[in-house]
Amino acid sequence: LCLAVAACSDSSPGETDEYTAAMNAGRYDDALAILKAQREQNPHDASLIQLEGLTFWKLNQYDNAIERFEAAVRLLPGYPEPLEDIGYIEMGRKRWAQSETAISRSLAISRRNARALTALAVVKLGTNNAAGAKVLLDEALRVQPGYPPAIFDIAWLNYKWFKRTEDAKRGFEQYIALAGDATQAGTAREILADINGEPGSRTSDRRRMAADRQSADNAIRRGNTAYARRDYTEATACYKRATEFDDRYPAAFLNLGLARQAAGDTSGAISALVGAV
């Protein structure tokens, strides 16, 4: 997948400077100890439990993280963010059904969440449901017009799935204008270059390679005509030209080798035939 989605939900209000400093320094075990001490004073603080989940997530202890997020939801059933976080964890593990369940539970609590709607769209696409993904992305933009990840993902769907090149182009241009140097901006620029056929882009390279192959085929046909009338010098020149047009075309090297052999140039024939392999 090449889609834009937020990495996790926003930080919990229970976050403290001491905890933040430990997390920023990569001292995740220390961060867990800080949270444990705080929870001894506030055992029913769902935001602290969510932070424990986020910390376990950082430690790649996914099952522990999910258990903590579920514990936060049990304490505060109207708290959607931990469920959203479970969805992101399961998405990362490509467990699409579990991810969809968690994000859907989050949206059942609070539907007006462009981030969660966009995440659920990515999950839909993980199961090849492009039409379902598009419906969710459209809803995300109704909830939050101009939401950059949704704009990027719709453009990507138009480019990769629906083959609506002009719609994709407009979407990527809009995303770049809104997102600046965001994570997916480089990808958007590469795809725009590809759509526009700019030098060095994949489309430009494909077009050049196709043109080179066509030129090589034309040269081979001229060589075949010369070879048929036993003009091996002319045939050799034509086949040599074909290898210059496309130096990865086995047929060009094979014909060059045969023409050189017919002309009595054994060493030259061997050299050309090696290029055909």
Image: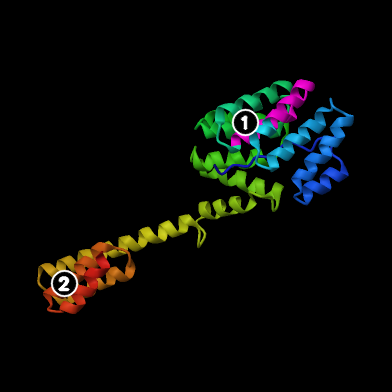
- Horizontal and vertical percent position of residue 187: 59, 51
Q: Residue at x 15, y 77 (%)?
A: 266
Q: Of the residues tagged 1 and 2, which is closer to the observer?
A: 1
Labelled disc at residue 5: none
216 or 15: nearer the eye? 15
Check if mark 1's residue and mark 2's residue have beta carbons within 8 Å: no
Place residue 92 in its image quadrant: top right
Question: Which circle's residue, 1 or 2, is located before the other in the chain?
Answer: 1
Residue 31 x/y as whole percent: 79, 43
Image quadrant occupied by the N terminus: top right
Q: Nearer the viewer, residue 212 or 4?
A: 4
Horizontal arrangement in the rendering, residue 208 relative to residue 57 (left or right): left
Taking the magenta stretch, the answer to whether it contains residue 86 is yes
Q: How many residues crowd around disc 1 within 10 Å: few (fewer than 14), some, or many (20 or more)?
A: many
Residue sitting at the far right: 41
**Residues in magenta?**
67-91
Q: Residue at x 61, y 43 (%)?
A: 171
Q: Which is the main secondary structure of the residues drawn in magenta?
A: helix
Report the disc number at residue 120.
1
Question: Would residue 106 be visible to someone looking at this image?
Answer: yes
The percent coordinates of residue 201 (x first, y second) are: 50, 58
Residue 274 sits in quarter: bottom left
Disc 2 marks a residue whose amino acid type is Ala
53 with respect to 221 (left or right): right
Q: Which residue is mark 2?
A: 259
Which secondary structure lies at badge 2? Answer: helix
Q: Secondary structure at mark 1?
A: helix
Residue plotted at (22% across, 69% down): 273
Residue positioned 42% across, 56% down in the render: 206
